[in-house]
Image: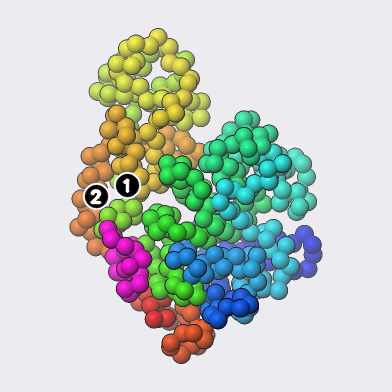
Amino acid sequence: MSELTASTSTESISTEDSPTGITGANILLDHVTKRFPGQARPAVDGLTMEIPAGKIVMLVGPSGCGKTTTLKMINRLIEPTEGRIVVDGDDVTNMNGDTLRRGIGYVIQAGGLFPHMTVATNIGLVPKMLGWDKARIAARVDELLELVSLDPALYRNRYPKELSGGQQQRVGVARALAADPPVLLMDEPFGAVDPITRLRLQDELLNIQEELQKTIVCVTHDFDEAVKLGDWIAIFNEGAQLEQYDTPERILGDPANEFVENFIGSGAGLKQLTLTRVAEVGFGDAVVGNPGEQAADVLARLIDAGHGHAVIVDERHRPIQWLSRRKLGRLNVISNVPDPKLPVVGYRATLNDALDTMLVSSAGAALVTGRRDMFKGVIDVQTVMDAITRSQTAAVLESDQAPVGLNTGVFQAQEPAADADLSETNSNGTDARASQ
């Protein structure tokens, strides 16, 4: 796996691709406490928490519970008062902080871009600090813009003020990934954009994660977002006390205590619909056309297939139009002008997202896209409704044993757990409950 040392000024966290494709690193917060001057209680109190490599871990909880402090201690923007931080088996607590942060991606609201730098300069900042040559940086910039679905030719020389909020956030993610770090920290990354853009950015993150398999730790106030994105969810109470650290399925189906039930709120059954992805329920094929084709030819294929609409894709197989038989009958040649209101949903999107998209579509269906926004098929309302019916009768799914997560701080009511017992804490998959 990766190595992490503290011997030179050019060191960084790095990791080689594993046989399973995971490029992330394990993280362990080992009895970590943070006390701020003038506060009676620690902001984080004796937290021991394992974050598995290649997974997305969502930190949620009420305001002031210590989740952002916990996140920032991983890259030591906030220094822990006590305890150790271990990344890929190496204690980074005493490592040079600047060096550590160059090897960990960090994303905040609105991307945190430098306004006086172009997109390319923003993305290439950390690689430049690490001594990469100009050609390598330029190639990496273009590669990452492609990854976050921004055309390099159009965006590499723009400034942040020339981008929408969603585009700025995409560039922020690209910058965080520039030096190929094993760990990506995200602090309310989608909180400053509108709901539609937020859904698209969430889908984009899932697509990127499927491709890269980094270790992602994300703070959010939105529990629905945590359910959608997280492989594991940590629900914190005051002092970063772990109330439950588990899969979304278990938290929704079997909350650990009253605090978790209240935090989830009403409609837990409906929230379970966010656990099913579009890719899991299947989708149909479509008649596909290209700009420059004769509309009559596309219409003939449409009639032969018995379909009502044809999907027009660009040279990279991204959907740009969805034309009905009537529309095709009025055209001579298919144009290359994209439809800004195209009902598109990512194949990693939830059924809730798909249903929302379809409700505003005149076709009563949505176009499904995969990696790099490539067209994959069509999903309709009936497919979603059938899946909802099945999910309402399904039991809570069995899944992997939960990672270690508990508190052993002085404000805990129970006696601190011994280090030797950590491996047994999660034997029943409800590790955080041991701290109650």
First to last magenta residue range: 249-268
Decide: few, some or many residues near mark 1? Use Cα within 10 Å; few <14, some 14-19, many ≥20. Answer: many
Residue depicted at x 57% and y 68%: 69
Q: How far from the left and from the top, in percent, is residue 395? A: 24, 62
Q: Residues within 10 Å of mark 2 (few under 14, many from 20)?
A: some
In space, the residues marked 1 and 2 are separated at their CA atoms by 8 Å
> Dot 2: what SS?
helix
Quarter holding the N terminus is: bottom right
Residue 344 image offset from top left, x and y in percent: 39, 35
Residue wearing tag 1: 351
Which residue lies at the image location 29% right of the left edge and 65% below the top edge? 253
| Residue 124 in which image quadrant | top right
Query: Where is residue 249 shown, x and y percent of the image?
Result: 33, 62
Question: Of the residues shown, which amino acid type is indicated by label 2?
Answer: Ile
Q: Position of residue 435 (x, y in %)?
A: 42, 81
Q: Which mark is residue 225?
A: none
Badge 1 amino acid: Leu
| As drawn, 9 above or below 115 | below
| Quadrant assignment for the C terminus | bottom left
**365 shown above or below 140:** above
The numbered mark at residue 388 is 2
- Residue at 22% from the left image edge and 39% from the top image edge: 382
- Evaluate if marks 1 and 2 touch, with contact meaning CB atoms under 8 Å apart: yes
| Magenta portion: prevailing SS class | helix
| Residue extending furthest toward the top | 332
Callout 1: SS? helix
Q: Is residue 82 above or below residue 301?
A: below
The residue closer to the viewer here, 5 or 358, is 358
- Left or right: 76 in relation to 165: right
